[in-house]
């Protein structure tokens, strides 16, 4: 049974002029990831759909986890102590002589204070750190793996699988969406 839409799609084999219909379908025995994972009953189909809901929810949790970790790493970097280097001007002197800084007067409740306002003209690349970058790479790799597994499930064009993934995204975003400041997907 086809549902939602149908369109002609160019066949992968360019020699044959035949095309194939690409349609959403509701066949319960749709394999997921391999022929060994083919639901044979309503119960196994429901379990497969529940798995996809959980996997999509995990994907949202991973996005939120990455955003929280990035914020922590940035905070740790900002709290890092700096050491004076012989022969190099202190940060306060470099700021006061920088073309990116301008002197202004700040007033609050009748009190005035002279402050330096510094603007960054270009984005600074943070240095590679052993305590941060391998962990970031692992998180990104797991996120990509989960995203590709979800994509493969959607590509089966099974309506139940598709709606299960949407449900998982909804549940995950509802639970931890506020932590993902910059959602990627």
Image (cartoon, rainbow, N blue to C red):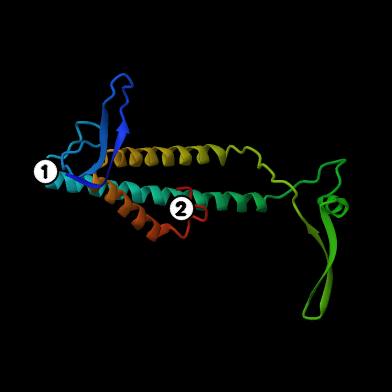
Query: What residue lies at 55% left-to-right and 49% top-to-bottom?
Result: 70
Q: Nearer the viewer, residue 169 or 20?
A: 20
Q: Secondary structure at mark 2?
A: helix
Residue indicated by mark 1: 41
- Mark 1 vs mark 2, CA separation in Å: 35 Å
Compare residues 7 and 57 and report the one nearer the observer: 7
Judge whether 127 appears above or below 119 on screen.
Answer: above
Tell me the SS state at disc 1. Answer: loop
Tell me the tag on residue 89.
none
Mark 2 crowdedness (10 Å alpha carbons): few <14, some 14-19, many ≥20 = many
Q: Are marks 1 and 2 in contact (CB under 8 Å)?
A: no
Q: Residue furthest front?
A: 17
Quadrant for the N terminus, please. top left
Tell me the crowding category of disc 1: few under 14, some 14 to 19, or many 20 or more residues within 10 angstroms, Cα based. few
Residue visible at 56% across and 39% down in the picture: 133
Q: Where does label 2 land, which residue?
A: 64
Residue 12, position in %: x, y? 32, 25
Residue at x-position 35% and y-position 57%? 170
Q: Earlier in the sequence, mark 1 or mark 2?
A: 1
Viewer-side label of 1, 2: 1
Q: Which of the 4 quarters of the picture holds residue 104?
A: bottom right
């Amino acid at each position: 049974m086809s549902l939602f839409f149908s369109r002609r799609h160019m066949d992968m084999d360019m020699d044959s002029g035949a095309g194939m219909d690409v349609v959403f379908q509701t066949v319960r025995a749709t394999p997921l990831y391999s022929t060994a994972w083919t639901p044979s009953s309503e119960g196994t189909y429901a379990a497969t759909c529940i798995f996809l809901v959980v996997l999509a929810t995990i994907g949202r949790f991973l996005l939120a986890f990455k955003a929280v970790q990035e914020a922590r790493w940035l905070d740790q970097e900002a709290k890092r102590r700096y050491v004076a280097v012989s022969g190099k001007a202190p940060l306060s002197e470099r700021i006061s002589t920088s073309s990116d800084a301008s002197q202004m007067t700040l007033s609050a409740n009748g009190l005035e204070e002279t402050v330096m306002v510094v603007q960054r003209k270009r984005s600074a690349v943070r240095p590679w750190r052993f305590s941060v970058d391998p962990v970031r790479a692992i998180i990104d790799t797991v996120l990509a793996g989960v995203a590709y597994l979800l994509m493969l499930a959607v590509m089966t064009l099974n309506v139940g699988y598709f709606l299960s993934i949407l449900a998982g995204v909804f549940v995950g975003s509802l639970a931890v969406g506020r932590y993902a400041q910059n959602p990627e997907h």
